[in-house]
Image (cartoon, rainbow, N blue to C red):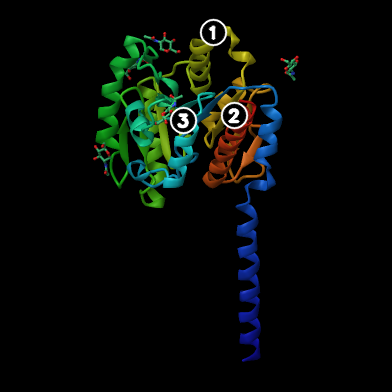
Amino acid sequence: MTLKIFTNLLIIIFFVSSLKNIQSTSSCGDIDFDSILKDYLKNATEIDIFLDFDGTLAEITPHPNNTVTTTSMKNTLLELSKHPEISTTIISGRALSDVEQKIQIDNFTYSGNHGFEILFTNGSKYIHQIPESLSANFSKLLQELEQKVEKHNAWIENKIYSLTFHYHETPEHLKRMLMEQAILIVTKYGYRANQAHDAIEIKPPIQWNKGLAAEYILSHKYDDLWRNRKILSVGDDRTDEDIMKVIKGFGLSFRVTNHNDLVTNADYKIPTVECVQELLDAINRHYLKKQSKCSCKN
Ligand SMILES: *[C@@H]1O[C@H](CO)[C@@H](O)[C@H](O)[C@H]1NC(C)=O
Ligand SMILES: *[C@@H]1O[C@H](CO)[C@@H](O)[C@H](O)[C@H]1NC(C)=O
Ligand SMILES: *[C@@H]1O[C@H](CO)[C@@H](O)[C@H](O)[C@H]1NC(C)=O
Ligand SMILES: *[C@@H]1O[C@H](CO)[C@@H](O)[C@H](O)[C@H]1NC(C)=O
Ligand SMILES: *[C@@H]1O[C@H](CO)[C@@H](O)[C@H](O)[C@H]1NC(C)=O
């Protein structure tokens, strides 16, 4: 009997101390966003921001259709869009029309399919060219995947320029088999398969990525002068590392991850989507302060 009380007590102590752990990990790793931004933007008026969507602005859900930004994140993004000094690009692995529909803010730039599609704020659209020989294989690849691996709750997302094979809801013991089968089909048609969270990203084997797309966007907006600008990037995915690499040294980047030992090009690691919002709120605060300083002078 006393033993039972004793073990119950231990369980309670363990539970309380694990709660404390949860609290301390959700504190954005003790990063002081305000002072980082104050320092980074010391001399600058304008900033370009590149944001990933899934896992960065919204929690990842088992089905991508169900992924949404919280109302407070949506408000934070709307605040960002109100500052004329801030240019924001949402750059995602989703199809362009999909990510645009998820955010719905007019004066943001959008890029889909990991940079293959870009929509500027003036409405002009860029689509990175894929050789005819490869695009001819796309529908065959899609068809064979649909026939052979679209089963056991796995499914294929057709993003027109790329595909995603999702197997999040596949029974655990079948995942590996389906994934390996999918990769064989993808490589047979000359496409590239990249591992994502319970998914395979299927892309044409073309030297193009989010980093090159970010360079394309910046150089079309500002010519060669873009390297003198302040650029901030936030993402949770391996594909976001390409942007972080491009701006390393003069940019400011944040990788959303809770793995302490993850190797990254980012300047900082932040653990959660909530922390991304704290960062974006800090940017808004920085520019609001600037605004009020300016009106004091007038
Ligand atoms: C900040 O701006 C001043 C005036 O434009 C310039 O002389 C100085 O070099 C800049 N400092 C940095 C660190 O960019
Ligand atoms: C997800 O959205 C797409 C496009 O709107 C639709 O075609 C598809 O049926 C949806 N899937 C589910 C499971 O809701
Ligand atoms: C951007 O759009 C928002 C509304 O979506 C608007 O309030 C804001 O003034 C716009 N900003 C610029 C710089 O056009
Ligand atoms: C298209 O698919 C065929 C059949 O698998 C393959 O032999 C060919 O190399 C692919 N084309 C390219 C450009 O990879
Ligand atoms: C739209 O904006 C982009 C980036 O600033 C620019 O390169 C392009 O020429 C513009 N297109 C039109 C039609 O004005």
Which comes before the other along the chain, label 3 or label 2?
3
Q: Which residue is mark 1?
A: 223
User: What x and y, as percent, mark residue 293?
Assistant: 64, 31
Q: Which one is earlier in the sequence, the residue at label 1 or at label 3?
A: 3
Q: Nearer the viewer, residue 278 or 160?
A: 278
Residue type for callout 1: Asp
Q: Which residue is mark 3?
A: 81
Say if disc 1 is inside 8 Å of ligand 5.
Answer: no
Q: Nearer the viewer, residue 224 or 189?
A: 224
Q: Which residue occupies the foreground of this view, 76 or 234?
A: 76
Q: x%, y% of residue 143?
A: 25, 28
The CA span between labels 1 and 3 is 23 Å
Look at the image and tell me in which quarter the C terminus lies. top right
Residue 174: give x, y in percent of width and height: 38, 48
Mark 1 vs 2, N-terminal side = 1
Could you give the CA–CA distance between mark 1 and mark 2, rounded to whole angstroms? 32 Å
Label 1, secondary structure: give it: helix
Q: Position of residue 260 (x, y in %)?
A: 66, 44
Which marked residue is nearer to the observer: mark 1 or mark 3?
3
Q: Amino acid at mark 2?
A: Ser
Q: Is residue 247 left or right of residue 83?
A: right
Cβ–Cβ under 8 Å for marks 3 and 2: no
The numbered mark at residue 295 is: 2
**Total numbered circles:** 3
| Quarter of image, res 199 | top left
In the image, the residue with mark 3 has its CB under 8 Å from the nearest atom of ligand 3? yes
Res. 295 image quadrant: top right
Residue depth check, mark 3 versus mark 2: number of the one nearer the observer? 2
What residue appears at the point 44 percent right and 44 percent down from the top-left corner?
Answer: 60
Q: In the shown orientation, is residue 250 left or right of residue 137?
A: right
Going by the numbered disc 3, the residue's amino acid type is Ser
Q: Secondary structure at mark 3?
A: helix
